[in-house]
Amino acid sequence: MSDALTIRYNNSFTKVVDAIKVKSDMTVKVFQAPQGFGKTHNLILEWIPYLFATTKTQVVVITAPLSDIVSDNTFKLKSAGLKHGFIGTTDIAEALKFMKGGMKVVLYVTNQMLFATDSDMPNLLKEEIKKTNFAIIDDEFHAWSASSSENYKEVLGHHGGKFKASMYNTLAEFAPYTNYLFGITATPNIEVQGLIDTYGKLNYELVNKDSVILPQELRDRSAWMGQVFWRTNISKLIDRAIEDAEYVEKSTGFKRVTMIVSEQNKSTDSWTIDDTLDYIQPRIPYTEKHDEFQIAVTSVHGCYLYTKNGDRKKTTDEEILIFANDLDNPLRYILVVDKFRMGINCNPLKGLVMLKSTDSKRSDGSAVLEGGLQMCGRLLRPYAGISGQEFWEDYEGSLEKCPTFPKEINKMNYYMMDTPMWRAVMQEFEENIAPNYCDIDLCPYCGANLSASAMETEDKIKLRLNEEFGI
């Protein structure tokens, strides 16, 4: 995919890489792009080959906060390695063997594995990569980047207890050996934005401010904002979500997937994932085959598929996403606890039921938005009634070029517990992240209708940006 927006984003990376000096700068260079834009896709297919081709880099370590992000992109990494002449792996021991053989290696692991596991293999890796020319790239940088227990409350909205800032401290340990420390995120936190300082010598810098992509620029390659329903009654939220999903499927003939997020622990006003499962099983409709697995459940306790009648079989996060994206597969409901919070691709996923009564605040009382925005962004992948692969490969990542489809299937609906934090999250999401569907030209800055002269001005601005970033 080589549209102007993607080129603009990738060129911002190459400009930063080309400007990196030899002298240690003690800075993590953070790039921002919208949710669903393809940040990890471009990281693997464009950024890493560029690093190997234009610098002396021999080893790249990619980290992500969740194992399902790693598994969702492992095949893509290994395929890119075959094409561009590097070894892609998720195994530290294997990476070390290839490093000793002098090969170019990309290791993809979780943040937990690289930054917070005190065992022989991760510790050996940390020592060995210091002897090479290496780069570290952290995906979903906002998730682990708090620089200290003192800053934890401001970054995440609650106190960190025994928080050790393991990612920050490890990156600070690497910084004297490499200037190729990068982060990518759609939701930079207040340390990355520079609103508060990091607590140590390592700095964060948001390096592509001048090329940030706006929501309305993405309306041809993104899901569109639908409706938001607010309740304090859990069962009413779920009932409405099931009713809406059934209506869209019956009226359009296209698959629709809904995700339901439950609490980890039971309380008087919350439901666990087991409560949610028990509630929806008798309420979802039968399919033509009564024994089809319509429900997936994923948590730290395992991954399972369920039928309406209660039959169960074991599965994996990777399989759940495959089944959800398969337009002929009966899977319609994904029940999660602390899984699939960020970095997943599921095009038919257009309903989110949030049963967590989260209300995270900073010390000044303002809501912490980043985690909530990431959760809402799971619905942003475009859906034209075709697979994601068809969308990008056959129709050039453009909804306008796709065969005619009912617009309702690409609209996102949210069913939210009514708390001040979730209200603030949805306001930010609607105003600054989620595009709205429209057939007319809108100002990408305020959303107003554009006159002919204004459209000409907008074209001039785009031309200037394109020239600036080499498009």
Image: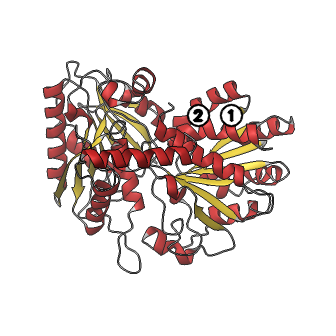
- In the rendered image, which residue does mark 1 sit on? 88
Badge 2 vs badge 1, beta-carbon distance below 8 Å: yes
Q: Compute the Cα span from label 2 to label 1.
A: 8 Å
Give the amino acid at mark 1. Gly
Residue 448 vs residue 93, the one in the foreground: 448
Give the amino acid at mark 2. Thr
Residue 454 vs residue 46, the one in the foreground: 454
Q: Position of residue 60 (x, y in %)?
A: 71, 44
Mark 2 or 1, nearer chain start: 2
Image quadrant in which the C terminus is located = top right
Q: Residue at x 56, y 63 (%)?
A: 145
Please tell me whether mark 2 sits on a helix, a strand or a loop. Answer: helix
| Few, some or many residues within 10 Å of mark 2 (<14, 14–19, 20+) | some
- In the rendered image, which residue does mark 2 sit on? 74
Coloration mode: secondary structure
Residue 113 vs residue 397, the one in the foreground: 397
Q: Position of residue 158 (x, y in %)?
A: 43, 72
Residue 23 vs residue 136, the one in the foreground: 23
Q: Position of residue 106 (x, y in %)?
A: 70, 39
* Residue 37 versus residue 360 in the image, above or below: above
In the displayed structure, does residue 369 sit left or right of residue 354? right
Q: Residue furthest bottom?
A: 364
